[in-house]
Image (cartoon, helix red, strand yellow):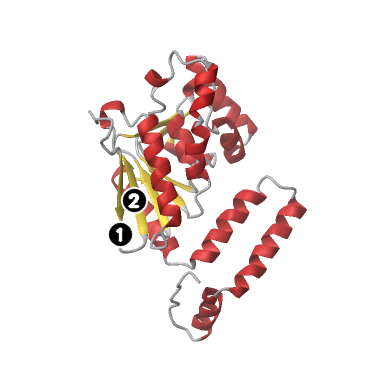
Amino acid sequence: MNSPNEPVVILEIGDDAVALLRISRPEAKNALNSAVREQLAEQFRTLAADKKVRAIVLTGGEQCFVAGADIREFADATPVEMYLRHTEYLWEAIGRCPKPVIAAVNGFALGGGCELAMHCDIIVAGESARFGQPEVKLGLMPGAGGTQRLVRAVGKFQAMRIALTGCLVPAPEALAMGMVSEVVNDDQTISRALELAAQIAALPPLAVAQIKEVMLAGADLPLDSALVLERKAFQLLFDSKDQKEGARAFLEKRKASFAGE
């Protein structure tokens, strides 16, 4: 059992500018209690400001990504108690991270675990992965973006089926409906996520950050407004040293070296 002060979110930073965050609470199937949420938020805020980190991989255990929220923490809670917890601020640290975040998912990603994966930008799922929003079976509903991110990812009819029945969605089915990015063998999930992260980390950080910001912000705007946002961000990048380096490297037929400037 983890003690209250023992870290349950383990951080490793590689030489390739990729940070690996691992949730380690195996005795509770990595359930999201307050300690996990707070440590995740703290790590994401730190990584967002760390110039040595250009991409982040988030994972859980080999058998379970995150089985959901810790039911013991809210079974008897009142509405005011839930309000005063303001867990939205903890989720916001992940959702608003300016750097690309890749979820490496093996086993169950249910409830808050599914929502956690959907806070990421890319999801690499092992063949054993199972996704779901089973809150309805507890007389509840998703409360950390599950209804909103899910419908944006897979459309109304699949999202309604998943949220209203609380069913489990196997990884191949999740891939077919656009809920995940890739499905790989279970023993390759983290290595593939790290590989993708390293590819992204080697690219110009300012361009990567603008792509992420504009894609997420533009998704909820009218097309004309989103295209204006895209165009202005595109123009802004012409003031970066990396853009000039990328163009020169292409013309000189050499590998570019991007400094994030």
Left or right, 48 with respect to 18, comes to right
Q: Residues within 10 Å of mark 1 (few under 14, many from 20)?
A: few
Q: Quick check: marks 2 and 1 in contact, CB under 8 Å?
A: yes
35 and 31: which is toward the camera = 35
Q: Residue at x 60, y 34 (%)?
A: 148
13 and 157: which is toward the camera = 13
Left or right, 230 with respect to 252, comes to right
* Percent x, y of residue 5: 27, 34
Q: Amino acid at mark 2?
A: Leu
Quarter-of-image position of residue 74: top left
Quarter-of-image position of residue 244: bottom right
Q: Residue at x 29, y 34 (%)?
A: 63
Residue 104, can we see it? yes
Q: Secondary structure at mark 1?
A: loop
Closer to the chain start, of discs 2 and 1, is 1
**Vertical position of residue 152 compared to residue 28: above or below:** below
Residue bearing the label numbered 2: 20
* Percent x, y of residue 242: 52, 74
Task: Measure how far apart labels 2 and 1 are at the Cα level.
Answer: 8 Å
Q: Residues within 10 Å of mark 2 (few under 14, many from 20)?
A: many
Q: Secondary structure at mark 2?
A: strand
Q: Residue at x 30, y 26 (%)?
A: 28
Q: Residue at x 45, y 72 (%)?
A: 259
Residue 169, can we see it? no
Residue bearing the label numbered 1: 14
Q: Amino acid at mark 1?
A: Gly
